[in-house]
Structures are given as C-alpha cells and as structure tokens.
Amino acid sequence: MKTRQLPFAATHLPGVPAPPEVSPDAELLLRLKARAAELPIEGNLPAFTGANAWLNSPPLTPAGLRGKVVAVDFWTFTCINWLRTLPYLRAWAKKYRDEGLVVIGVHTPEFPFEHDIENVRRAAKDLKVEYPIAIDSDYAVWNAFDNNYWPALYLVDAQGRIRNHRYGEGAYEMSEMVIQQLLAEAGFSGFRDDLVSVDPQGPEVAADWSSQASPETYLGYERGDTFASPGGVVPDEPHPYTTPTRLLLNDWALAGNWTVTDGAAKLIEAGGRIAFRFHARDVNLVMGPDRKGDTVRFRVFIDGKVGGAVHGSDVDAQGQGATSEQRTYQLIRQSAEIEDRTFEIEFLDPGVEAYCFTFG
C-alpha cells in the first residue's frame, strides 16, 4: 500500500501533547470520503426484474445489494468497444470483491445470435467473465436504466443511489477512483489505493485512435453503406457479386454468391470473398457459421498478399483461420506505420454469416 504520513513539527511547546498521528488507512478513508461527498446523486438503482435469466449468480435485487457498492456494466459479447473495457472490469471485480464491490454485467444483445443464452454462456466462459450476469434479451433492464450505449458503466453507492456513469471506453482511472470513494463512504477499508494494472491481449487491447480512419461498418442492407460491388445490393436473394477494380477508402465489396439480408451477408457457395479498403491498426469482423456445429475455414490477405506478420489473434502466420462460433474475430493487427490498405477475406467453405467490421 502507498503510505503518506501527515507531517507535523518535530518540536512543540513543553506540556502540549503532540498532534495525534493519523494512520495511513485512516487518512486514505477520510480523503476518499470527502471526495465521495462531492459526487452527484443521479437517481436510484433500478430493479433487474425484467432480466430473462442470471449467470454466475442467483437473481440480484436493489434491496439485496444495499450495503454494497455496485458497478452495473451494459455489454454485448461482440462489441469491440466493450471488449476493450473488459480487462478493467475483471480486475476491479477481483481486487474489490472482498472489500464491498459487486460488479454486475447486464448482457443486452445487438445481433440475433446474442439472444441465445447458450451463446452468452459460452462467450462469458471464453472471456473469463466470472461476475454476475443479468441476461437482458428483451431490453427490460436497458430501458429501466434509460440506457442507450454499449458499453455503459453505472456506479452505485451502498444506499442504492447512482453516483457516476461512463459511456464508452476510457477514463478507467477515474472510474476506479470513484469506486474507491464509494467504498470508503460506505465504511469499507483494507483495499489498496493504487489503481489496477492490466495486460490486455488480442481484441482487448485499446484502440490506436490516432491512426484510425475507418468506421464501424455493417454488412446488412438495413444499416450498411459504402457498398461498392457493381449493381449494388440485391436484397434477400442469392446473387453473384463482384468486386470493382478499385476501392475508395472505407468502401467494401463482395465477390461470389451471397445473400444480403437486413442484418448480414450470408455466403451460399465456397470461395466467396469480402474486400475492404481501410485505414487502421486492427481489422475485426463479427461473423460465424449459420449452423451450430459447423466450421468455416478462411484466408486473409493484405494488398493481395497473405497477412503474414500483420495477422490478428484469430489468424495464423500463413493467413489462415476458421470460424466455428459467432463472435468478434481479430483478423489484422499491424505494428508498422498505418496507411490505406486493402483487406480481403476468402471463405473456403460455404455457410458463413458476416455482420459487421470494426477497427482499432
């Protein structure tokens, strides 16, 4: 623990007792309590009564959580922005779980397959999400919080009042300091006042915002744009697509026999490709086989060459990989200077569903 003693003069008037020495723990708690008193009250913790199910815990209620500091985190397991916050959530849950903090993940789905509780259960296990999870497939908890974002973090004091919130990534130090302040305000002690240190890997590594010039891009026609295959989208029908001779930055195109639905592009025959002209360190793709138990092999290319040294965590050095479950796949991770490049993925088997590109 970091310690700081309150200084006082080495000498004092005869007969006058020296000022009492304040212990480091007591000083820390006094300081944190003073800061906690300045936090606003944003409302009361809503009930989780609309949750469809719970993982890692029996159902939790605001009344049952009284006396605890609560961190409520809205997530969905394919969200790249949430994945990059996960190392901190895991670290806070571990560091403060015996000191009065309860972390609750509210899983509110974006894509259809995220409504399947078994998919959430598998993702939670793979991602080492061990704290309580409220399954919010009907958006009941989301609406009770009047929430609009993934990720969203709400910090609740021991009296059940929301005292702080954060939308999106970042400000981890500030959020952890608020947690410490609320714990101190509730009378908990014994925790260290240093901040957690994390070692993120793969898609959990923070984005390189300074070099990112490509936006999140959906492949279904409902939210898709910048689609550059000649002739445009033929909705909801199998169609042979081709790629243009040149892609502009952030344009993307299909090649092969695909069906483009409102939410995804579905490959009908092996050999189909997706091309994207991008500018970012990382390329991620939400995708998976359209039938449980299937595996779809793929190869990744950059500027027409096998990915090699710039391959992501879900691709080997030969540019090869496979998808056997619907999730976010990291396909490219660059370390050299970032410039406009053309990404391509070729699927060696039919049956893949591709939903959304994200970048980092």
Image (cartoon, rainbow, N blue to C red):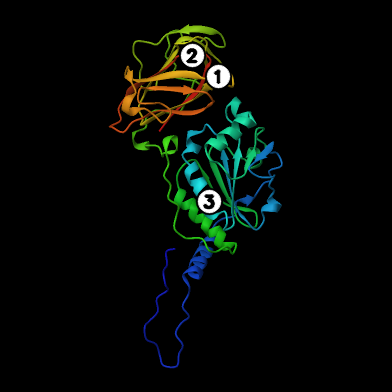
The Cα atoms of the two marked residues, 3 and 2, are separated by 41 Å
Q: Nearer the viewer, residue 82 or 38?
A: 82
Q: Nearer the viewer, residue 75 or 213?
A: 75
- SS at badge 3: helix
Few, some or many residues within 10 Å of mark 2 (<14, 14–19, 20+):
some
Q: Position of residue 125 (x, y in %)?
A: 56, 37
Q: Position of residue 345 (x, y in %)?
A: 41, 18
Rendered residue at 33%/20% (across/down):
306
- Which of marks 2 and 3 precedes in the sequence? 3
Residue 214 vs 13, above or below: the answer is above
Label 1 close to label 2 by CB (< 8 Å)? yes
Rendered residue at 44%/34% (across/down):
203
Q: Amino acid at mark 3?
A: Lys
Q: Quadrant of residue 119?
A: top right
Task: Say left or right for 172 vs 102.
Answer: left
Q: Position of residue 271 (x, y in %)?
A: 44, 11
The Cα atoms of the two marked residues, 1 and 2, are separated by 10 Å
Residue matched to label 1: 294
Residue matched to label 2: 349
Q: Amino acid at mark 2?
A: Asp
The Cα atoms of the two marked residues, 1 and 3, are separated by 36 Å
Residue matched to label 3: 94
Of the residues tagged 1 and 3, which is closer to the observer? 1
